[in-house]
Image: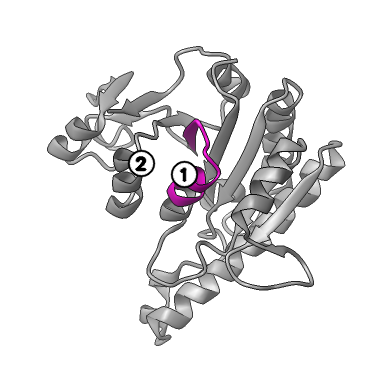
Amino acid sequence: MKYKRILLKLSGEALMGDEGYGIDPKRLEQYAQEIKKVKDLGLEIAIVIGGGNIFRGIQAEGAGIDRVQGDYMGMLATVINGMAVQGVLENHGMYTRLMSGFKIEQVCEPFIRRRAIRHLEKGRVVIFGAGIGNPYFTTDSTASLRAIEIEADVVLKGTRVDGVYTADPEKDADAKRYSKISFQEVYEKGLNVMDMTAFTLCQENDLPIIVFDMNKPGNLLDLVNGEKVGTLIQS
């Protein structure tokens, strides 16, 4: 395998599947099957999931809710998603741990770096919920930071598109996909990959990012086996 330890970033919206809101059991099942294939190879896997299928912190202001309060609500949404993913992964025979950026001891462990690494070494899938535990940071930033902390080899950003394009492929039929691009080129071209904080963390720590289509069966397995899937971003 090309990698030993990965951090898989999934969007909350992806969990909606064909539903308009919440969690689609079919999509959960699909993701569990894809992750199981990779886990059976002996790969160490950490996961960060967004909460946009339930609540986004930036929605709060429009509803008259303080932004900080709204961000904490969004963090709780990621814990709900993490619990859902944890449940379906364990149904497929995988051992898991859900770790939170703040204390919710009844349902998950608090994040402790050394403990997270030890879980990975023991073959458990580690799911990071509640962001980094602070408002104003996205789950992209959580993915970058946690990947650096656990010494992951790569951040795999699973989306509904198959990589980074010159323009939005859903709006521009002439958009071209990059198979490989540097961090600097992404900056210069103004391409939307991650929020700037998350992206800069990866660049400064020489941590590659691969943006790929998580919804296509077999993509995750091909990717960790070294196949050219999605767009590779590195220094």
How many labels were placed on the picture?
A: 2
Q: Residue at x 57, y 56 (%)?
A: 20
Q: What kind of residue is marked 1?
A: Ile
First in residue order: circle 2 vs circle 1: 1
Q: Secondary structure at mark 2?
A: helix
Q: Residue at x 42, y 82 (%)?
A: 63
Q: Quadrant of residue 79?
A: bottom right
Q: How far separated are the C-alphas under marks 2 and 1?
A: 8 Å
Q: What kind of residue is marked 2?
A: Cys
Specify the quadrant that holds the N terminus.
top right
Q: Quadrant of residue 105?
A: bottom right
The answer to whether residue 116 of the structure is visible from this angle is yes
User: Which residue is outermost to the left?
Assistant: 188
Depicted 44 relative to depicted 57: above or below: above
Depicted 221 relative to depicted 169: above or below: above
The residue stretch that appears in magenta: 144-157
Q: Is residue 105 left or right of residue 69?
A: right
Q: Is residue 84 left or right of residue 186?
A: right
Residue 149 falls inside the magenta stretch: yes
Rate crowding at label 2 as few (under 14), some (14 to 19) or many (20 or more) other CA atoms within 10 Å.
many
Q: Which mark is residue 55?
A: none
The one of 14 and 187 positioned closer to us in this rendering: 187
Q: Position of residue 229 (x, y in %)?
A: 46, 19
From the viewer's perspective, is the residue at label 2 or at label 1 nearer?
A: 1
Q: Position of residue 68 (x, y in %)?
A: 42, 80
Residue underneath mark 2: 202
Q: Is residue 81 left or right of residue 95?
A: left
Q: Residue at x 52, y 62 (%)?
A: 131
Residue underneath mark 1: 148
Q: Residue at x 64, y 51 (%)?
A: 114
